[in-house]
């Protein structure tokens, strides 16, 4: 048994499906030794993946960024996602995909001879945001962004994100808002947005944030519902005085942040821009 996972969970590892508690990787896997690998998380609603192509495109970009060879064709990735969904205990799930550089004697430099990447996949239960989170919002505290300078790569080296999330847990809140040089970057595992004067704003796509699949998606939805949208650097005082703050990720979808550093955001209730984007996001899922 793996603590926290149903006993009969099946996972995919290097070409085979096995029970999660029977799947084994080498102790010399570079993912285990160095965090040398990448991952992606695809949200699946009632058996249908949302924006699978975009998630697989990002997986390609992450592999290229780390010069890890592409282990499978696009058709094989799509089949794998389909098979993980088919074997999932619940029709709504999160498909997790991970590729590491593979197994080799411990040496920081990339192996000099070709090695086979390790490919891992699983579908886990999708704990969707609760009605309270959707209707009353989540609480966020600000922290200094202490991560490295390649946050655009969806790397499995997530210690900075792990420590950031733990700060939220210890403060009794849901997420953190990370700031680098007093400019907003992102949450521990979500993108963050502000609304000011009716305009939706998000930090620019650069090496300081992960470009979430919902980053472009919410931009598209904002366009559709007539909310002006801009990607630009956002200073701390703009976050503190924002009318609304939003969080987005595969797991959160889009959620309102109604408490920031213990103070209410706007009037302390989810705002009108959130309401429009939430409705558009829900419509999109309903249309899958
Ligand atoms: N995290 N920024 C970070 C640091 C993230 O880890 C994530 C997603 C996002 C949002 O990306 P997307 O919209 O594609 O989910 C932004 C996933 C859900 C995770 O690590 O579990």
Image (cartoon, rainbow, N blue to C red):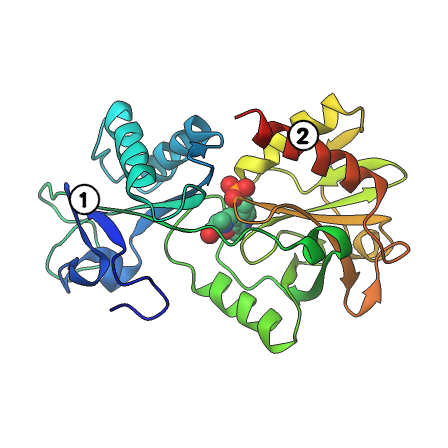
**Viewed as shown, does residue 54 lie left or right of 73?**
right
As drawn, the residue found furthest toward the bottom would be 170
Q: In the image, which disc is placed on residue 117?
A: 1
**Viewed as shown, does residue 54 lie left or right of 220?**
left
Residue at the image position 67 percent from the left and 30 percent from the top: 219
Residue 35's place in the image compared with 42, above or below, is below
Residue 221's place in the image compared with 35, above or below, is above
The location of residue 250, given as percent across then percent down, is 52, 44
Residue at the image position 21 percent from the left and 31 percent from the top: 72
Q: Quadrant of residue 34?
A: bottom left
Residue at the image position 13 percent from the left and 54 percent from the top: 103
Does any portion of residue 207 appear in the rendered image? no
Q: What quarter of the picture does the N terminus occupy?
A: bottom left
Which residue has dot 2 on it?
219
Q: Nearer the viewer, mark 1 or mark 2?
A: 2
Q: Quadrant of residue 78?
A: top left
The location of residue 145, given as percent across then percent down, is 59, 61
Lower sequence index among marks 1 and 2: 1
Secondary structure under tag 2 reads helix
């Amino acid at each position: 048994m793996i603590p926290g996972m149903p006993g009969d969970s099946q996972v995919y590892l290097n070409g085979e499906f096995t029970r999660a508690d029977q799947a084994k990787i080498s102790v010399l896997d570079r993912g285990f030794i160095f965090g040398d690998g990448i991952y992606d998380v695809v949200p699946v609603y009632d058996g249908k993946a949302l924006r699978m192509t975009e998630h697989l495109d990002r997986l390609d970009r992450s592999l290229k960024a780390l010069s890890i060879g592409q282990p499978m064709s696009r058709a094989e990735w799509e089949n794998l996602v389909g098979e993980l969904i088919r074997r999932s205990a619940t029709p709504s799930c999160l498909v997790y995909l991970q590729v590491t550089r593979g197994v080799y004697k411990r040496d920081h430099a990339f192996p000099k001879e070709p090695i086979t990447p390790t490919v891992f996949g699983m579908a886990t239960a999708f704990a969707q945001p609760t009605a309270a989170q959707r209707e009353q919002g989540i609480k966020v505290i600000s922290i200094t962004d202490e991560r490295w300078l390649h946050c655009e790569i969806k790397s499995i080296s997530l210690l900075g994100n792990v420590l950031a999330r733990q700060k939220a847990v210890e403060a009794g809140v849901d997420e953190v808002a990370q700031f680098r040089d007093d400019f907003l970057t992102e949450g521990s595992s979500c993108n963050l947005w502000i609304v000011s004067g009716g305009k939706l704003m998000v930090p620019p796509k650069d090496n300081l944030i992960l470009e979430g699949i919902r980053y472009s998606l919410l931009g598209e939805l904002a366009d559709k519902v007539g909310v002006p949208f801009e990607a630009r650097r956002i200073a701390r005082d703009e976050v503190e005085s924002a009318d609304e703050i939003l969080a987005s990720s595969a797991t959160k979808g889009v959620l309102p942040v109604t408490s920031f550093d213990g103070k209410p955001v706007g009037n302390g209730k989810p705002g009108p821009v959130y309401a429009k984007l939430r409705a558009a996001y829900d419509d999109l899922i309903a249309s899958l």
